[in-house]
Structure formats: structure tokens, C-alpha cells
Amino acid sequence: MAVEVLVLKETAAGERRVAATPETVRKLVAAGATVRVEPGAGLGAGVTDQAYAEAGAVLAAGEARAAAEVVLCVQPPPAGALGALREGAVLVGMLHPQADEARAAALQARGIRSFPLERLPRTTRAQAMDVLSSQAGMAGYKAVLIAAQLAPRFFPMLTTAAGTIRPSRVLIVGAGVAGLQAIATARRLGAQVEGFDVRPETREQIESLGGKFLDLGVSAAGEGGYARALTDEERAEQQRRLAEHVRNIDVIVCTAAVPGRPAPKIISAAMVDGMKPGSVIVDLAAETGGNCELTVRGETIDHQGVTVAGPLNLASMGAVHASEMYARNVYNFVALFLKDGALSFDWNDELLAKTAWPEPPATPAAVDAA
Ligand code: NAD
């Protein structure tokens, strides 16, 4: 008997992505799944119901939620939808259960075995399943395009009959996955790009993309390739040097984050006061509080001639490619436990054990067949 897999139609406001594409539907079917797709699930990402059907999926009827053994989504389904899922179903997506008590309670009450993909350990083997990386790439790209759109100037240097135009000076704050993509994109648009990060290894990465590393004299490499929070002294030093520097910057794109914590405040209101009118700040960290003190979640404001934008869910703006990557990430993860038409969870596999929420028992049976 085939495993019943359901692809949800996203309902969060502004969400255009989808958790499976015709390509991954074919792969799921080949692995022994019956794939049902909720009508219209792919439209925001350019996939018609017909394209899913041609790939071997079945359009889901109302009762599909109660029958599905594996449910795929992008954002956490609302509590009501969780209540409609079958007890013991497997739910895979960016679920952030701890971010919402009602959601956590609903997942537990239904006995749902959830795999919040943002919990995936970021090991080499997990790279093909890493939704944080694939979605951050799109977000970094879009953030620079938004900045270019808002900026009252060219990014590239231009030599024209009306004289020479200086290239824009762009500073990317935080050089993780999103920041590096932002640097690459701003460079392609011809800007003069600088980047900085508290992880020293980013110097080489920034330079390899044609950016200049802005050295603020603070290094804060933490565990697992992530940054740690700065001490008060380190923060003061970073702030002092940065305040001087941003006076001559035209565009700042903020991407700095510390996992599990609110975004670090890096660009103070006083720093923005010191920037030239006509400068632009795009704060990709708006979702987790913003790197800039003046950022307003989801809004674009004017502060004494400086535009400060705090756009949300930038990955969804590039829903076609973001979904292509997300769906492959999801398929690669599901392939860890869906094989030959059956579900089997090897809790000795850290990718399954560490992603699962709640975590499986400390000494589980090695393999738990569903
Ligand atoms: P993230 O979104 O948590 O943070 C973005 C960046 O902000 C990071 O580079 C961080 O160092 C930086 N930052 C934090 N505090 C800062 C501050 N006060 N000032 C300036 N910068 C600050 O991180 P991410 O982009 O998801 O990933 C970070 C790194 O994790 C990657 O660049 C990589 O080295 C590692 N990683 C490894 C794998 C893997 O091996 N599978 C996959 C993805 C990422």
C-alpha cells in the first residue's frame, strides 16, 4: 500500500510558496507515495493543478487532511487545520512550534510527529535539505533589488555625456547565506560593496565575491558556524566604528542574526541621523525585530530623508525559484524516512532525531516503523 502524502495550500497572508513541485511529486510517487495536492496550492509559485496531475498527483478532496500520513507545508498550518489532520500524522515544514504556544499545544494534542525543518542540524549531509539556506539566498537577492528600487540613484558607475556618475556605496551587514547573496547581487548591479560580519571567516567569502571586508575590530565566532551574541564592550566598539563609517554609505542591507534570539541591534537611530538624506536601509532582519533601531516590521518609513524598509517574507517574493529549492529540500528530507512505499524512522540518524519535535526518547528503538 502506498503512503498517503498531502501537499497543503498555504494560507498565511502573502505566502506564495508551495512545498512540492511537479519534479518532487514525481520523485515522491517513485518512492511509493500517493501524492494529493490541495487545489490551487501551486498557483502562487507558477504551478497549475494540471501540472501536478501530469506529474502523477491527485487533486485533494476535503477528507484528504484526515487521511494523510505525511503532510508537507511551507509555513505552519493554522491551529484549525492542525486539528483536521489525522492523529499521528507526520508534518514537515517550517513549523516554529516554540514560537506559538497554541500551535505547540495543537501539535502535541493531535500526536503529530512534526519535523520543523529550521531545526535541521547544518551538517554537510544536511545541505541538500537546508531550507534556511535555500530561502535565505532568495531573501538576500530580493533585499538588494528592493534597495535598488528605493534608492534615488544608480548602483553602477556610469560615464555619460552629462558627466560621470559615481557608483553607489553599499554596505551589507551580516555575511551569512543571505548576506553573501546580497553582496553578489549588489556587485552584479555594479555597486561598490562592503560587507561585515562578526565571524572572521567571512572576510575571505566577502572578498571572493568582489566585496570589501569592513573590519570593525570585533570577532564573535560561536558554535556550529553561527555567531554568538556580543559582549557590551564588543558592541560599543562595533557601534563606534560603524557610526563613523555609515556617514558615507548610500545603501545598507541588514541581514545579521543570532539563532534563537531577537536580531542584534546594529544600526542605531543616531547612526541613521548621521547618514545622508537619500540613503536607503533595507532590513531583512525585520522579521525578528530588525538590525536597525528604526525599522518598522513590514513597512517602509522615511526618517529625515533616509528610507528605512522592513520587508517581510522576501523568499515568497521569489516564489517560483524559492519553491523549487524548498520542495527539493523537503523531498530530500522525506526520503530519509519514506522508502519503497513505507515509513520507517531511524532515530539513530541525527538528521531525523534532532529535527523531530518533540524530540524522540533518548534511547529509542533504532528503527520505528509507522
Ligand atoms: P544567520 O542567519 O543566523 O546570521 C546571518 C549572519 O549574521 C551570520 O553570518 C552571523 O555571523 C551574522 N551576525 C550575527 N550577529 C552579528 C553582529 N552583531 N554583527 C554582524 N554580523 C552578525 O546565519 P546563516 O546565514 O543562516 O548561516 C551562518 C553560517 O552558518 C553560514 O555562513 C555557514 O558558515 C554556516 N552554515 C553551514 C551550513 C552547512 O554546513 N550545512 C549550512 C548553512 C550555514
Image (tube, rainbow, N blue to C red):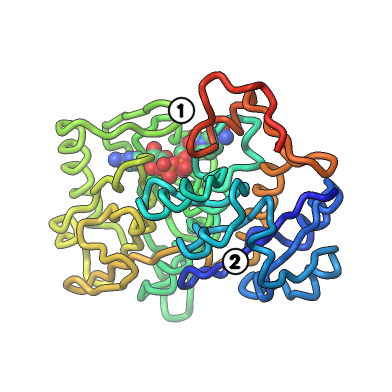
Q: Residue at x 48, y 56 (%)?
A: 140
Residue 26 as seen in the image, left or right of residue 132:
right
The residue sitting at 16% across, 58% down in the picture is: 269
Q: Is residue 113 visible?
A: yes
Q: Amino acid at mark 1?
A: Gly
Is the C-beta of the residue carrying label 1 under 8 Å from the nearest atom of ligand 1?
yes
List the residue tagged with mark 1.
224
Name which residue lies at 37% across and 28% down.
Answer: 221
Ligand 1 lies in quarter: top left
Say whether disc 2 or disc 1 marks the residue closer to the N-terminus.
1
Please state which amino acid type lies under the numbered disc 2: Ala
Q: Which residue is mark 2?
A: 319
In the image, 321 versus 9, the foreground residue is 9
The C terminus, quarter of image: top right
Q: Residues within 10 Å of mark 1 (few under 14, many from 20)?
A: few
- The image shows residue 130 at horizontal and vertical percentages of 59, 43
Seen as rendered, the residue at the extreme bottom is 162
- Residue 306's quadrant in the figure? bottom left
Between the C-alphas of marks 2 and 1, the distance is 29 Å
Instruction: Indicate left or right for 2 with 112 as reference.
Output: right
